[in-house]
């Protein structure tokens, strides 16, 4: 067996956290010129867990461990020493080139059953969980306070899945059965530098289909709603459904559009989402199969950068039942996402798309991160990420934002 004149020692410290604890323990290592090879620290409910892997000479190791033990006793924390062989260290270093994945689980609350199920999927794929962190603020204790609460846990996972597609499918099925949302993303440089986000409008940024609201005013609500629902489920072609619905609006006074716009029901969390996106420099686009008038209303309200939707033809102050220009359908949404990314000089992997209907699927598939939001079953089944349990500001957690960062910059949130 090869002999070394150095030792590798892993120390694990646990106990009540206090200011200066890490500084005093590492100062001992510093006085003896120990090299720190790895370090990690977590604080859960004022309880510290600190791990340090260091390298030192064989002649100094005993003195270092003795001083650390005395200091730990003085500070009322426990300390454990574990020798690490050079072979084990070399194997650990060799694993650093493996893929990393971020798995995010999100909901009103997080349960042990949900975490256990996700951890089992990770284990079955022969992956290793490197770290777990909470992205949301502290959870309320009482159930009556949970109605608008949010709970998000992020797993950092290392390795190559045995079957990535099956893993993604298993996670989505778990999310559906255990009432949480999930995202699995490769942890690349692009994930950490998103720059463009594109939203569907109807039933995504707003909690209604505007064409249904117009139809109610025109007295053809039931007919149009039935066509809308069939289109969103993917049962009929979007273009065909759009032409049929617009035709039914013929004769409607254009003044009702302003009334509807001023009373649009906004999706939960939209103000928080838009404020954070704008203040962190994101370009924001609406790519909608709805109507430009309402997209522009949201553009002015939230400072959105781009709006692409459909224009209704108006004659003598009334809708003609026809539209102007090309229809913004599923294919066009994907094309527009690519076009805006090109104009903004953004790699397609730095883009995000959010939508709920079948006509959003091409856009969701094109973006670097595609999120189905309170989506129809067909859309949710085809999507890789889905949010169904909380408001649209849940998108921020799939992007890696933490509540602590948001509230530091934006105290109102």
Image (cartoon, rainbow, N blue to C red):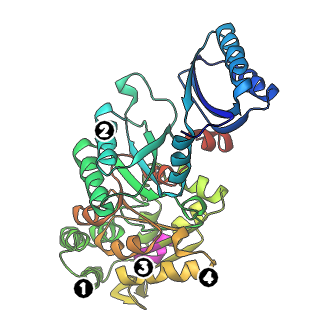
Which residue is label 3 attached to?
A: 333
Residue situated furthest bottom in the rendering: 325
Q: Percent from the top left, x then y, of residue 269?
A: 48, 49
Which residue is label 2 attached to?
A: 114
In contact (CB < 8 Å): disc 3 and disc 4:
no
Of tags 4 and 1, which is closer to the observer? 4
Q: Where does the magenta region start and end?
A: 287-295
Query: Which element carries disc 2, helix, strand or loop?
Result: helix
Instruction: Give the answer, above or below, for where 194 lies relative to 396.
Output: below
Query: Which element carries disc 1, helix, strand or loop?
Result: helix
Query: Which element carries disc 4, helix, strand or loop?
Result: helix
Q: How far separated are the C-alphas under marks 1 and 3?
A: 17 Å
Q: Is residue 61 left or right of residue 134?
A: right
- Does label 4 or label 1 sit earlier along the sequence? 1
Q: Is residue 132 left or right of residue 305?
A: left
Of tags 1 and 3, which is closer to the observer? 3
Q: Percent from the top left, x then y, of residue 300?
A: 59, 66
Q: Percent from the top left, x then y, of residue 347?
A: 57, 75
Which mark identifies residue 240? 1
Q: How far separated are the C-alphas under marks 2 and 1?
A: 42 Å
Q: How far separated are the C-alphas under marks 3 and 4?
A: 15 Å
């Amino acid at each position: 067996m090869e002999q070394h004149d150095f030792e590798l020692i892993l120390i694990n410290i646990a106990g009540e956290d206090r200011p200066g604890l890490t500084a005093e323990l590492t100062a001992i290592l510093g006085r003896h010129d120990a090299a720190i090879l790895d370090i990690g620290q977590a604080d859960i409910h004022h309880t510290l867990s600190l791990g340090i892997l260091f390298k030192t000479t064989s002649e100094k190791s005993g003195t270092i461990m003795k001083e650390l033990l005395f200091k730990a006793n003085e500070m009322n924390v426990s300390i454990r020493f574990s020798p690490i062989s050079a072979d084990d260290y070399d194997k650990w270093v060799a694993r650093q080139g493996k893929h990393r994945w971020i798995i995010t689980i999100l909901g009103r609350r997080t349960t042990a059953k949900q975490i256990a199920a996700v951890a089992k999927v990770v284990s079955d794929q022969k992956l290793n969980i490197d770290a777990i962190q909470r992205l949301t603020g502290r959870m309320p204790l009482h159930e009556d306070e949970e109605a608008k609460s949010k709970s998000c846990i992020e797993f950092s996972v290392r390795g190559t899945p045995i079957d990535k597609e099956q893993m993604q499918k298993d996670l989505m099925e778990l999310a559906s059965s255990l009432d949480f949302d999930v995202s699995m993303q490769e942890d690349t440089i692009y994930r950490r530098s998103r720059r463009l986000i594109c939203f569907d409008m109807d039933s995504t940024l707003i909690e209604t289909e505007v064409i249904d609201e117009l139809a109610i005013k025109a007295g053809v609500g039931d007919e149009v709603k039935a066509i809308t629902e069939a289109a969103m489920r993917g049962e009929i072609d979007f273009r065909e459904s759009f032409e049929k619905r617009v035709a039914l609006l013929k004769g409607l006074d254009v003044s009702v559009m302003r009334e509807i716009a001023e009373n649009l029901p906004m999706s939960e969390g939209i103000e928080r989402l838009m404020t954070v996106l704008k203040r962190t420099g994101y370009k924001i686009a609406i790519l909608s199969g709805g109507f430009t008038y309402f997209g522009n209303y949201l553009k002015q309200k939230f400072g959105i950068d781009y709006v692409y939707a459909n224009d209704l033809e108006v004659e003598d102050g009334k809708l003609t039942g026809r539209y102007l220009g090309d229809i913004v359908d599923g294919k066009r949404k994907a094309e527009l996402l690519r076009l805006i990314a090109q104009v903004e000089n953004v790699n397609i992997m730095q883009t995000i798309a959010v939508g709920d209907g079948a006509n959003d699927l091409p856009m969701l598939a094109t973006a670097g991160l595609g999120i189905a939001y309170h989506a129809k079953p067909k859309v949710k089944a085809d999507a890789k990420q889905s949010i169904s349990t909380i408001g649209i500001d849940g998108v921020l957690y799939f992007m890696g934002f933490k509540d602590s960062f948001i509230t530091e910059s934006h105290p109102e949130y």
